[in-house]
Image: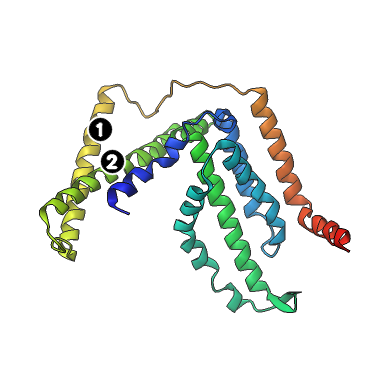
């Protein structure tokens, strides 16, 4: 994939947030709070209870299907950052070799269960966060946090960080194109050239950020970034929040996976 393709793919989550599905029309504050509860419920789940995490997949599947978000795109984004999760738990099966279960004659160690738990929690939390952005947009999430009482300076920093990521990417794209036009075959790809390009990129980005900040000050910026969109909680928002809270409580405090397994064994017997 070329640098240009990677750059235009960077904002695809925000472009997906312009949809008009029922999930997109939900109030951003409700989606932010429900996603926070979902993350808390998943992370607080017992580390050796892998089967109990299965019902939590209903939440991201619901958001993706009703919100019209491509599942392949979300899975690809999850895979891109999955090495971090593997790096955290890859040694668990070797450090904790206690046998805690036997499935089809194969002993299952506690370390393997904890490793699978880390991977499943990682997939659930990252996919839920990506789907929140894809159905709300990052600026929409920030404005929702502001209306929920977060400090204005914190929200402004988040918005600036997100905006300047695109500024950095745009400057990098210009520098990369200029280098490609001035180099032939493999020339211009040495380490010394990349060091010079990185320095040029930093200087250009800082200069452009300073000009943007001065333009904002001239237009009355005082530390807070207001929004013209105003939304009110509707019956659909309250229904979504109440249903999600109830289901998360059931998934977290009741062994639904074990109960379904017992029912399945009785039915098959």
Residue that badge 2 annotates: 167
- The one nearer the camera, 254 or 268, is 268
Residue lying at 41% horizontally and 41% vertically, measured from the top left? 12
Image quarter hosting the C terminus:
bottom right
Name above or below for residue 104 compared with residue 172: below
The first of marks 1 and 2 along the sequence is 2
Q: Residue 193 placed where, x, y %?
A: 15, 60
Distance from label 1 to label 2 (Cα)?
Answer: 10 Å
Q: Residues within 10 Å of mark 2 (few under 14, many from 20)?
A: some
Image quadrant assignment for residue 158: top left
Q: Residue 203 placed where, x, y %?
A: 18, 47
Q: Residue furthest front?
A: 268
Regarding mark 1 in the picture, which secondary structure is present there? helix
Q: For the residues carrying marks 1 and 2, which lies nearer the camera in this image? A: 2
- The one nearer the camera, 9 or 215, is 9
- Residue 75 is at least partly visible in this image: yes
Residue lying at 51% horizontally and 44% vertically, measured from the top left? 70
Image quarter hosting the N terminus:
bottom left
Name above or below for residue 98 compared with residue 113: below
Residue that badge 1 annotates: 212
Residue lying at 60% horizontally and 67% vertically, measured from the top left? 115
Q: Are marks 1 and 2 in contact (CB under 8 Å)?
A: yes
């Amino acid at each position: 994939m070329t640098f240009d393709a990677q750059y235009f793919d960077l904002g695809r989550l925000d472009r997906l947030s312009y949809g008009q599905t029922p999930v997109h029309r939900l109030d951003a504050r409700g989606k932010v709070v429900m996603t926070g509860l979902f993350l808390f419920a998943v992370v607080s789940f017992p580390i050796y209870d892998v089967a109990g995490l299965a019902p939590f997949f209903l939440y991201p599947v619901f958001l993706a299907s009703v919100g019209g978000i491509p599942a392949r795109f979300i899975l690809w984004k999850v895979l891109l950052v999955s090495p971090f999760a593997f790096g955290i738990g890859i040694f668990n099966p070797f450090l904790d070799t206690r046998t805690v279960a036997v499935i089809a004659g194969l002993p299952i160690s506690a370390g393997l269960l904890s490793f699978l738990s880390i991977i499943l929690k990682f997939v659930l939390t990252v996919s839920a966060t990506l789907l929140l952005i894809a159905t709300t947009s990052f600026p929409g999430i920030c404005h929702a946090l502001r209306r929920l009482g977060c400090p204005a300076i914190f929200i402004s920093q988040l918005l600036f960080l997100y905006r300047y990521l695109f500024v950095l990417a745009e400057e990098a794209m210009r520098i990369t194109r200029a280098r490609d036009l001035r180099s032939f075959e493999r020339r211009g790809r040495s380490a010394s050239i990349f060091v010079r390009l990185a320095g040029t990129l930093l200087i250009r980005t800082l200069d452009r950020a300073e000009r943007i900040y001065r333009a904002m000050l001239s237009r009355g910026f005082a530390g807070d970034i207001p929004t013209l969109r105003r939304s009110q909680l509707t019956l659909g928002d309250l229904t979504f929040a109440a249903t999600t809270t109830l289901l998360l409580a059931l998934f977290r405090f009741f062994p639904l996976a074990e109960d379904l397994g017992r029912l399945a064994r009785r039915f098959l017997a």
